[in-house]
Image (cartoon, rainbow, N blue to C red):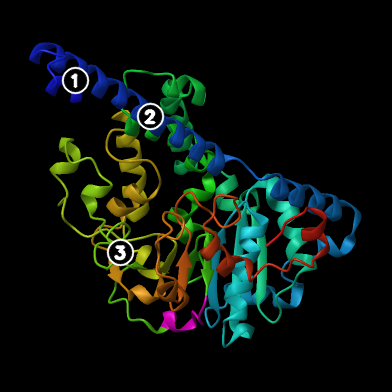
Amino acid sequence: MVKMKEGGYDAKTFAVKLREMVTLMEQRTRLAKIQEYLYRHVASSSIPKQLHCLDLRLAHEHTNNAAARLQLPSAELVPALVDNSYYHFVLASDNVLAASVVATSLVRNCLRPNKVVIHIITDRKTYYPMQAWFSLHPLSPAVIEVKALHHFDWFSKGKVPVLEAMEKDQKVRSQFRGGSSAIVANTSEKPNVIAAKLQALSPKYNSVMNHIRIHLPELFPSLNKVVFLDDDIVIQTDLTPLWDIDMNGKVNGAVETCNGEDKFVMSKRLKSYLNFSHPLISENFNPNECAWAYGMNIFDLEAWRRTNISNKYHHWVAQNIKSDLSLWQLGTLPPGLIAFHGHVHVIDPFWHMLGLGYQENTNVDDVENAGVIHFNGRAKPWLDIAFPELRSLWTKYVDFSDKFIKSCNIRA
């Protein structure tokens, strides 16, 4: 600019120089964004060595210590598993430490823990470590059940739609699974497209733990109502009053995510998740309709069994696969928004505060006063990238003096 004013450049040369500078700056900005997305992907997708160590030590304990192989629950408590006078919570997780925090915070804050049943569902590889942990760390007087998916007769016999869909989904995603290096090396695509492809590499998007909630009526045929919990939440209040909420015949009690002071987290509508440029979506849904959240949901299983919600879910997952994953963003919430459409009862936001894994500017006072806090997002509290001022709300439910925690160097 100085040289231009001094007459060093004519207008044409100045324009060319300026354009070259802007182009170079855009290239550097693009590269920096892509590097940021890559580092976030690696940090959020990797299993910390401390958690891997915990699984191995608990699996070894399961093999060598009879006390780590107890039947969960004990024989005299088995009738409680199908007793609808109890408060039934379902937690699906392949993360032992995360499941422990959810269960511990639930029981510790419950006013009637003797009437609580926690059904923990895990996968085959995590079953022995999970059983060992809760055998050696009982949360009496609450009843704890630990089962792997292959223990469910319904799940191990015949075809399971969600598993078939996941296999097809895996094949479709393979078209851009050249690995993270190949994805970030693409110089023609926008950073947000590269971010989406990196996100697709995350194991959670092809984990059956992420899809299992759609089969709750089949997995628990004797139960009338359950509260389903994600493994990245912390419970800070007694949740038994959730059973007193009148669902008005609806199936899913959930917190809406389109109203609230936090515009980053609480501004989600259907257009935030579904692709309304696709006719299948635009012809069937309203883009401005409020979205709701998974993480802490009341499910009326009796009402659910009178609907076609599960079939609708599988139908739309199949449609998305046929459309090369063009109907919605990744994850299980978009097909859930479709399947439960018209079957959602909105509950008070106190019961579920979201966004603790997305941003640092969350109001700590609001977090401490919420009934359930949800670390949805990449910055999970068990990862090094967790926000320090929020992580302590999670670590307070971890006993760092425990021999397994100490031996794996898991620190506050």
Q: Which mark is residue 266?
A: none
Label 3 vs label 2: CA separation?
27 Å
Residue position for label 3: 262
Residue 337 locus on image (x, y percent): 30, 54
Res. 125 image quadrant: top right
Could you tell me which secondary element the residue under label 3 belongs to? loop
Q: Residues within 10 Å of mark 1 (few under 14, many from 20)?
A: few
Rendered location of residue 377, percent (x, y): 45, 52
Magenta residues? 236-243
Q: Residue at x 53, y 59 (%)?
A: 232
Residue 354 vertical position relative to residue 332 in the rendered view, above or below: below
Q: Of the residues shown, which amino acid type is indicated by label 3?
A: Asp
Decide whether residue 341 is among the magenta residues. Answer: no
Tell me which numbered mark, 3 or 2, is placed earlier along the sequence: 2
Mark 3 is surrounded, within 10 Å at the Cα level, by few (under 14), some (14 to 19) or many (20 or more) other residues, namely some
Percent across and percent down for residue 330 are: 38, 41
Nearer mark to the viewer, of 2 and 1? 1
Amino acid under disc 1: Lys
Q: CA distance from mark 2 to mark 1?
A: 39 Å
Q: Residue furthest right?
A: 64
